[in-house]
Amino acid sequence: MKILKRSIWEENKCFFIEDTKDSSYLGSVDANFLSGKLEIKNNTLKRDDIDIMDILNKLEGCEGKFIFANLDELRDFCILRNDLTIPGPFYKMYKGFKIYEDTLVFYVLIRPWSELIPITINVFDREALMIQFAKEKNMPIFCHGTSPFTGERVRIRYLDDFEVFPQYGCDKKENGNYADECNKSLKVSIKQRRAMENGCVYGWDSPLANPENYTNDGFYLVQEAKKKRSGIKSEPRF
């Protein structure tokens, strides 16, 4: 189990559900602690094939035992993790993270100040939710690109890390040409490719993850402005 922060500000709505008719939303589970175990208090999951017990067992087991051993452990964990803080209703401060599976994503909301229902797990169809977020940001759900560090071929999934293919070498120009050819069939522009490459490195809420901040040739607009002021001629980027 890998604990991940939210990647974009819009993900906050996944912790506080208002529209239960959202097609990507698959229901939620409320749980609290009872004799060192997480006990389900309310289950509104819409599908029988969602193995919520597997997630709870992971939270209770070796992967999450320092967080979910008991309420005191959970509170200690929350105190140290300001990066997981989420502002909520009534000026309450919550903690939240997400857990990815192949087809599902779980948004875990923690109320460290509550002894009744300290944990809520909201479940979403991963692909449907990522498509929704990508559309809002004018981004593709995935694309081909190159590593900003090594020049290797990568496959990038929106709001996720990239998958590296080191067997094709580190020729950034050659790998960049390959990425552009693959992206043509996906209708991914060079601007979007740049935003995807930099978003997974510098953060999906970063200005570098916004395709509108790039020229049609893939140059970051801030860099272009600096070059024009200094008289430096732009070189093609691959």
Image (tube, rainbow, N blue to C red):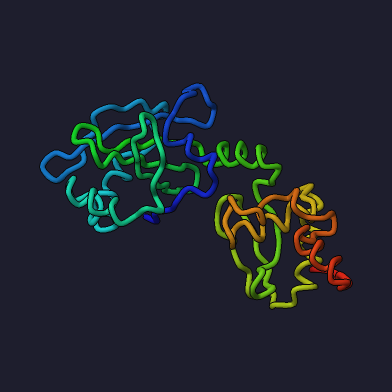
Does residue 137 appear to the left or right of 49 in the view shown?
A: right
Q: Residue at x 57, y 36 (%)?
A: 128
**In the depicted view, which residue is nearer to us: 144 or 115?**
115
Residue located at (14% from left, 46% from top): 36
Q: Position of residue 65 (x, y in %)?
A: 23, 55
Q: Hey, which quadrant is residue 145 in on the image?
A: bottom right
Of residue 185 and residue 112, the one placed in the foreground of this image is 112
State left or right for residue 233 relative to residue 136: right
Residue drawn 54% across and 27% down?
23
Residue 181 vs residue 132, the one in the foreground: 132
**Residue 220 placement (x, y as % from top left):** 76, 60
Question: Which residue is farthest front?
Answer: 229
Q: In the orientation shown, which residue stands out farthest toward the left?
A: 35
User: Residue 107's spot in the image, x, y percent?
Assistant: 41, 41
Q: Residue at coordinates 26% horizontally, 42% vertically from top-left?
A: 112
Note whether 175 is above or below 62 in the view shown.
Answer: below
Q: Is residue 175 above or below residue 127?
A: below
Quadrant (top left, top right, bottom left, bottom right) of the C terminus: bottom right
Q: Tell me where residue 93 appears, x and y as whole percent.
A: 35, 40
